[in-house]
Amino acid sequence: MRNQSPTFIAAAAMVFALWAGGLSAAPRESCAESLTRDIPQRAANAPGGREFAQQISSVSDDERESLIREQLKAGNIPQFLRHLVPIHLQSPLPDQSHELVVCAAPDYLAVGSDDDFVLMPMRLSTALSMASFFGFTLPTTRIVDAINAQAAVHLAPQPLPAGPQMRSTAYSLRHNEMVGEQRTALGAALGELIAGDKKDLVLTNRLRSHLDRVAIYGWHTDNGKPIQSLSTVHGWRYADYSHGARLISTRVFVDGVSRSIFDVIQDNRLAPMLSDEGVIGDAIGLIETLNARARDAMAAVVQDLIPRLARSTENH
């Protein structure tokens, strides 16, 4: 083989570099840690999951939500939840061959450290506002189904007896222990994509006509069928031990091209890849409306606390 000129070698090197660069844009690398950069680092003195659960065990529902927001905004979130997993979605339309990659948290939002965390049920408005704060959103039912289908670890749903206690922190702790025991029995490592431990808080067009409700879906059994069909039965203040909030990045990849999830979900051609309902129009506006409720509720908690703290000071 004859010697190649320096110019040829340089050109070949450039082609190889471009080819290698294309490989680096593969889905796994697309769901990079840079997508979680807006989640604050956890402080060394932040309470563990069990300690925090004890702190909220005897407060009102409104105060509980406020305290959950406080911990999440401060970054008291396990490290393993910051490593996103690619979820592949194909177009359901026969005349389209697009592939879409969604970057999802491997499990539901939790408070605490990798060694001591509690999967934290919360109101839909709290979940949406915290997701937005981190630059994320919540899944649709189609994304939930895809996560279940592609999960590395499938837990068997473990419903607890129904009743008023379902909303208690004690129930959440009990269920958290059950999930942890099942994880251990299966040898599941933190950071693996997991499904079956909770129902999902979801985004749906139904919320437009039910702004006073929470939307839940999922908890798939081993046959792939969800225990919970899409429901908006419960009021917006409702949250129980079985609910989970899974973070979904607002940056998705359509045929390898980075797009906003909100742009895609409003595209008539591409929205069916993300949503069984097709287009979710003005999803950002819908989320903002629901977020406002969370802000109003927290403001009401603060207003309620001010006179109580004043009375407490006077008594001392």
Image: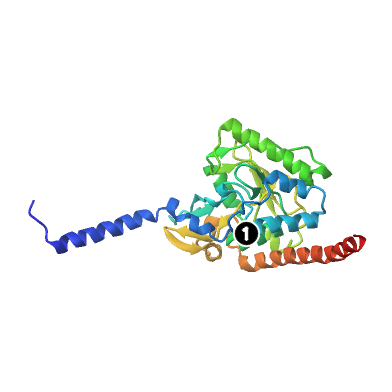
Q: Position of residue 259 (x, y in %)?
A: 48, 63
Which secondary structure lies at badge 1?
helix
Relative side of 307 to 261, left or right: right
Q: Position of residue 213 (x, y in %)?
A: 75, 58
Q: Which corner quadrant holds the C terminus?
A: bottom right
Q: Position of residue 177 (x, y in %)?
A: 69, 37
* Label 1: how many Cα within 10 Å (few below 14, some 14–19, many 20+): many
Residue annotated with mark 1: 131
Residue 163 seen in the current view: yes
Relative side of 283 to 64, left or right: left
Which residue, as the protein is rendered here, is positioned at the far right? Answer: 315
Image quadrant assignment for residue 148: top right
Which residue, as the protein is rendered here, is positioned at the far top? Answer: 185
**Colour scheme shown:** rainbow
Residue type at mark 1? Ala
Q: Position of residue 265 (x, y in %)?
A: 55, 62
Residue 157 seen in the current view: no
Which residue, as the protein is rendered here, is positioned at the far left? Answer: 2
Q: Residue at the location (62% across, 59% down)? A: 131
Relative side of 205 to 262, left or right: right
Q: Disc count in the image?
A: 1
Above or below, comparing residue 241 to residue 204 in the picture: above
Above or below, comparing residue 191 to residue 300 in the picture: above
Q: Residue at the location (76% across, 63% down)? A: 298
Q: Nearer the viewer, residue 89 or 93?
A: 89
Q: Nearer the viewer, residue 211 or 298?
A: 298
